[in-house]
Amino acid sequence: MNSKNGTLSIDSANMFTILKNRLYTDSGIVIRELVSNAQDAVEKFRQIGHDPSFSGEIKVVLDPEAKTLNIRDNGVGMSFEEVDKYINQIAFSGAEEFTKSKGGSIIGQFGLGFYSAFILASHVTIDTKSCNPDCPAVRWDCLENMSYSMGESERESLGTDVVLSLDPKNPFFDNPKLVQDLIGKFFAFAKTPIQFIAPGFEGTVTGGTEPEWLKAGNKESLENFYKSFFADPQGYVFEHAFESKDIGVRGVIFFRKINDGEAEIDGHIKVYCRGVYVGDNIPGLVPKLAALENGIIECESLPLLAARSGLALGDAKSEAVLISECISQELAIFFHDLFSNRRAELEAAWPDVGAFVKYGVLQDKIFSSVMARKILFMDSFGQCKTVAEHAANGGSAVYYASDMQEQAYYIDIFKQANAGCLLFDHVIDRPLLYKYETLFPKLKFSRIDSNLELVLGAEPLPEDERDAALLEEKMLALLGDRLKELKPVAKRLKSSHIAAVVTNDEESRRLADLMDMYGYLNPDDSDQKERVSKSKLLLNVSSKPVRHILKAESESAAKTAATHLLDMALLGQNALKPEYVPAFIQRSVKMLELFLDDGAESES
């Protein structure tokens, strides 16, 4: 066998197929790539500095009669040798070479973007004249089979025209606004103004002015920009602008109004590279927590082509990580400042930004390191407090409510006992609770219907032990068929107005909730959750209705009272089963009638 050394060969036709059908699959990419190239040409000429009065200009001309799309610029242009080097050699980037030599702010860096033109065109022409006065103008023609010809052009003006011969059925001809919308999408903040020329669109200009979000001081103007740009009429509660010159990134994050929970869950962080749109919420560059909000990120040196085509970031990965960490740090610093110096503003806006902060603490290590202990919760007295602030007055036990409506009775009981609880009533609060138990290992978190006797219990009287045992025995005898797994426990409570409540063991109830969530509880066994939760019926021996059961001579009256107390306790936890509701209502009506009759006799 003979040995051989050489260079791998590439079938140009196959390479073109890959470029057209795999690398670039969105026709809108054509506008983005070719106009970006035109911007690079203008920027090169500006940086070379041959003409101090130079004013960059880009025109996108759609000609329905000629069936062409022309991207025209008055930039640096190309010589014959440059066309041969940068166009005829696929993936040889003139922008990259220029950036290395001049250190300029050029967008493209891989030399592939130009060939996206063949997504739309069967024939592409380049007509260009270099700013070098010794170089004649050049014309380059290429068909989709990759056969090309080059020669001298009669062009006299500096710059480049890239002319695409389009399919006569191309939708751009019937609806030129499609092109205008693409220019507006990709180049809203372009440094060089871009003029779109088509029937009915002459003189339409995009870019060329300082972006509104970079202007300082005009709050009303910025809010109007936000509402229009993000199509969000609700506006925002806070905005945070930032810049890191070290890594070449700047931006603004707008914290949205959630509109009573009706706003979209995900926001839109629009990423730009020197004024050219790259994409929304780019993974690896935009932190997950930032993607909940709306905002604009502009990068100086992110290789735009890779992001345009949906490729992995490659060499830009480490840079993207730095940008992501920078954004997380900025968000953490911003909310730390709100908490430390603008607490009243933060509390007023918490219904809108609270979920963002909680999600950030769970998802982002940098944000969590700053904000984990600064999360606010509404307490049962209507005040915003952190867990540490709440625990400072309540010892080692932290009680929380997970549903304000379903647990309204328990919240009221706590108020009567002058005891507070925190509202963990957002869907994200359950995983956050587990994190808090790690952050605060000395605190014990219990839902408001757990271990109530610790909060509500009073100093027992000598006879309470005897009465409690008798009451528990009597309740089992009267309601054995209803109690089943609901164990009666009698205690003396601080308030005599509390008769009976259902309580659960906290750890067992959490297990029951998880089993219910994942479908491990038998839906035909209606008492299984109570059994797993180790639920109890807490009876107050100082309550008049409870003592009536204890002292009643009539078993019928005692059973009626016991049944009604049980139903009310279950109703307070939203756990009264539908089959018992009609009897509860009828019994309540009869009790009301007896009460009214007694009142009438007393008046007479």
Image (cartoon, grey):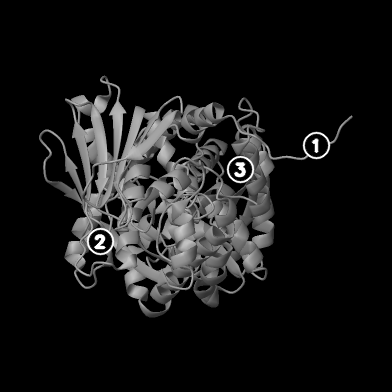
User: Of marks 1 and 2, which one's residue comes earlier in the chain?
Assistant: 1
Q: Position of residue 221 (x, y in %)?
A: 17, 63
**Left or right: 197 as drawn, with respect to 577:** left
Name above or below for residue 465 compared with residue 345: above
The residue closer to the viewer here, 552 or 174, is 174
Secondary element type, mark 1: loop
Amino acid at circle 3? Asp
Secondary element type, mark 3: helix
Q: Look at discs 3 and 1 and give the one toward the viewer.
A: 1
Q: Residue furthest right?
A: 1
The residue closer to the viewer here, 64 or 27, is 64
Q: Position of residue 569 (x, y in %)?
A: 51, 46
Q: Look at discs 3 and 2 and give the one toward the viewer.
A: 2
Amino acid at circle 1? Lys
Amino acid at circle 2? Pro
Q: Which residue is mark 2?
A: 211
Q: Which residue is mark 3?
A: 513
Name above or below for residue 400 compared with residue 511: below
CA–CA distance in space, label 3 to label 1: 69 Å
User: Of marks 3 and 2, which one's residue comes earlier in the chain?
Assistant: 2
Name above or below for residue 433 compared with residue 442: above
Q: Which residue is mark 1?
A: 4
User: Of marks 3 and 1, which one's residue comes earlier in the chain?
Assistant: 1
Total number of numbered labels?
A: 3
**Left or right: 187 as drawn, with respect to 581:** left
On the image, which quarter does residue 308 sit in?
Answer: top left
